Amino acid sequence: MLGRSFLFCVLVLAAGQASALTIYKYVDKNGVVTYSDQAVAGAQVFVFRDRMVERLDNQVKLETKKHDAGETLLVRNDLYAPVEIELSLSKLVNASGAPEQPIRWVLPPRSHIRLATLAPQVAGKPMRYTPRLRYALGDPRLLPKVYHYPLPWRGGPFRQTQGANGEYSHYTPKGRYAIDIAMPEGTPIVAARAGMVVKTENQQSGRGNNPSGNFVRILHDDGTMGVYLHLMRGSVSVREGQHVYAGEHLANSGNTGNSTGPHLHFVVQRNVGLALESIPFNFAQPVDSLPNFAVGGD
């Protein structure tokens, strides 16, 4: 197990330095999984899915209220964070009152808003239309403040295995400026900045069905969000709606989700207009490149 973890971290580091590196996944007859840069017989190309899957369908909802005059469309935000929304209506039949252009709004935390009321053009005949609701966490009108983030863990020193714009997996808008730090499972993870806990996942084990694994998302006062990924199952000690301070314990590091070895994936994001994107940030001190105890270095 230790040898495989060492190989995983080496591959992540090498991939961040070589733009054309392909990594292969091989499962032997005993079910042992090996990752390598060599295309041995039976190996498959390993595709790293660097995307966060945060299901908001049950917390940002389009509701329809029917009444004698027609139908009223409302959007409800049950999250502890503002949400930018956009509602558009198409394929209208026998419906009046629909906006010609999509309606955009920033909905405050734990609130709802009426966006449109439709009425039949011909009384007694049914209305038909197709609604489309788009949304993204955060308020795009807020601008990030300069902030130097303390290291979001206790212990170490640990090694950075992939930095910003890493060719292995840090190339998507959501993760372009993320940092991966290899560390033993169970390392205490702490808040690098004060804010409101707005999303958590705590029940995923192993690879699971979410590339992020278990995570904590914290909304800061300037609209940015710090996200801590691949956490140990059952270790998240904060809840959605809780205010946390810098240095407060959040969870323990793990190896859940689409992770090739024990590490913390830390990223700062903001809403840039109906889309979350990672943004550059600086730690308050250098990440040490001394021995990496996660892989048994000396």
Image: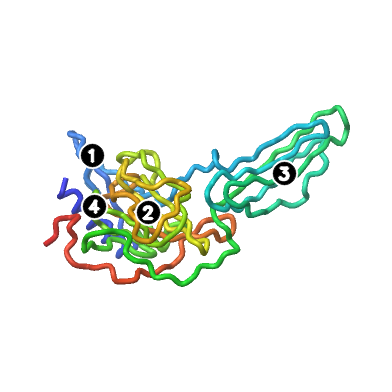
Indicate which disc residue 55 carries.
Answer: none
Q: CA distance from mark 3 to mark 1?
A: 49 Å
16 left or right of 72?
Answer: left
Q: Secondary structure at mark 1?
A: strand
> Mark 4 highlights which residue?
8
- Name the N-terminal-most of marks 4 and 2: 4
Residue sitting at the far right = 122
The percent position of residue 100, horizontal first and vertical second, equals 78, 50
Q: Secondary structure at mark 3?
A: strand
- Badge 1 crowding class, 10 Å Cα cut-off, few under 14, some 14 to 19, many 20 or more, is few
Front-most of 270 and 235? 235
Q: Quadrant of the C terminus?
A: bottom left
Do the CB atoms of the residues marked 3 and 1 lie less than 8 Å apart? Answer: no
Amino acid type, mark 1: Val
Do the CB atoms of the residues marked 4 and 2 lie less than 8 Å apart? Answer: no
The percent position of residue 36, horizontal first and vertical second, equals 23, 51
Front-most of 208 and 167? 208
Is residue 123 at all visible to an observer of this figure?
yes
